[in-house]
Image: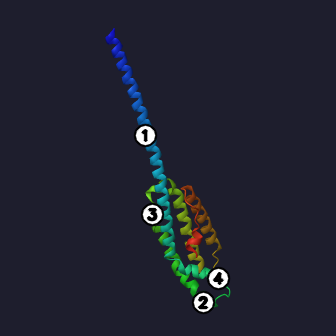
Amino acid sequence: MKKQWLIALGLALVVALTTACSNSDSTKSDSKTTSNKTETAANAKADMMQFYMNLVDKINSADKDINAYESALTADPKPSADELASLKEKAAAVAPNVEANIKELKIPSGLKDKKSDLEAILKDLEATYQLKANELKKDQPSLDAANAKFSSADDALGKLLQSVGLAKASLNNDVNS
């Protein structure tokens, strides 16, 4: 009888220790999961910020002449017709370069859950500069449709930045000023 009592006590002890160990593992697992989520969120923030800065750099490296032309359209006093024509010619020459620069951008693997949204934004930005290129070939170009498409992409990008915990940035301010 004593042996049975000792065996029962031993089994109870083993069960108690096993349960305690599994709870400890569960706590460690929960801690790891929380840690991984935090790390993933931090990586997404860093990747999104890097993506945004690359986008700004790619656009700014080629759109100075477009910005100069658009600024001249609203300047007071307006530039002469010859100056405006020269600015328009330079802008028309660089618009395809901006589009090509945008196409070169790669979406970081850490943003795979945002990839389709980022691809749509990039397509809108490419279309913006294609519209500008087409309009700048005309005698009386209107950049309103291109600028509306740019604003739409800018708003969508701002929302994505916020979705990963970053402040909403203005692509318009960062590339058109």
Q: Are marks 2 and 1 in contact (CB under 8 Å)?
A: no
Residue topped by disc 4: 73
Q: Residue at x 59, y 59 (%)?
A: 159
| Mark 2: amino acid | Glu
| Mark 4: amino acid | Leu
Distance, label 2 to label 1, CA atoms, is 67 Å
| Mark 3: amino acid | Lys
Mark sitting earlier along the chain (3/1): 1
Image position, residue 67 (x, y; %): 58, 79
Residue topped by disc 1: 29
Image position, residue 61 (x, y; %): 49, 76
Q: Residue at x 62, y 81 (%)?
A: 71
Residue topped by disc 2: 83
Q: Residue at x 57, y 58 (%)?
A: 162
Residue topped by disc 3: 106
Local secondary structure at mark 4: helix
25 or 9, which lies in front? 9
**Residue sitting at the far top:** 1
Distance, label 3 to label 4, CA atoms, is 34 Å
25 or 77, which lies in front? 25
Distance, label 3 to label 2, CA atoms, is 37 Å
Mark sitting earlier along the chain (2/1): 1
Image position, residue 43 (x, y; %): 46, 56
